Image (cartoon, rainbow, N blue to C red):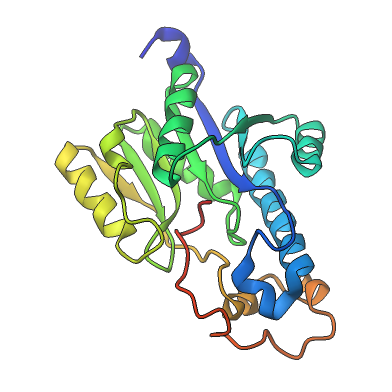
Amino acid sequence: MTASAAEAGCRVIVFARAPEPGKVKTRLIPALSAAGAAELHRRLVGHSLGAATGARLGPVELWCAPDTSDPFFRECERRLGISLWAQGEGDLGARMQRAFESALVHAARAILIGSDIPALSAQYLRDAERALAGGDDVVIGPAEDGGYVLVGLSHCDPELFRGIPWGGPKVLPETRRRIAALGWRLSELPALLDIDRPEDLERLPQEMRESLMPAAGGVGDPNASGTPRNRGGLS
């Protein structure tokens, strides 16, 4: 770690996909329609970016998939003063490793969050940064589904991300095992919900839920997608 990196404090990385109808939040389409699911995705990305900029920990980077060209990303850059980065190729682990390696060249600490976490707050991010600044090697914000919504690092090792079974309940236990094998000091924050399935919509803030489903008496068949939950807030 160079002196210049140490002086730079913390960078906050937000992972997000372009809000293209039919390609984001597809498990929610039975309840919201493709356009409604894409609109919810936009709002949740905006929420994550608002928490990240509001925490005032340091530069905020929006890592975009498939690239940075979507007008929504460009508007976020213009309005919030954030920087845009392309996630690039590879599985989630490879893309996360790439983002951390880039951020930690310029900062002593980096925190990566997903873009579907309605309960995420600036204080939650400050708590994560405080753990790293206090000497922890890694901090995790668990997701209620067995993954995680936040991971923060003071240094990066590829073993933390390589070959993880993304998309299932083993993500967090396997990550904890690898952290222990590396001999790293870990802190965990309270678990948060990430929005994946129709039944999760009931826990959205009321104003957001009602504006997305103004005529809906419920959220549709909670098992309509027939698919497992995703990777825990990261995309």
Q: Position of residue 113 (x, y in %)?
A: 52, 46
| Residue 232 higher or lower than 109, as above or below | below
- Numbered-mark total: 0
Q: Residue furthest top?
A: 3
| Residue 162 higher or lower than 217, as above or below | above
At a point 38% along the width and 56% down the height, the residue shown is: 166
Q: Position of residue 225 (x, y in %)?
A: 56, 79
Answer with the quarter of the image where residue 215 lies.
bottom right
At a point 49% along the width and 18% down the height, the residue shown is: 106
At a point 45% along the width and 15% down the height, the residue shown is: 5
Answer with the quarter of the image where residue 144 lies.
bottom left
Q: Nearer the viewer, residue 10 or 231?
A: 231
Q: Nearer the viewer, residue 1 or 213?
A: 213
At a point 56% along the width and 74% down the height, the residue shown is: 197
Q: Position of residue 149 (x, y in %)?
A: 47, 54
Q: Residue furthest bottom?
A: 217
25 sits to left or right of 73: left
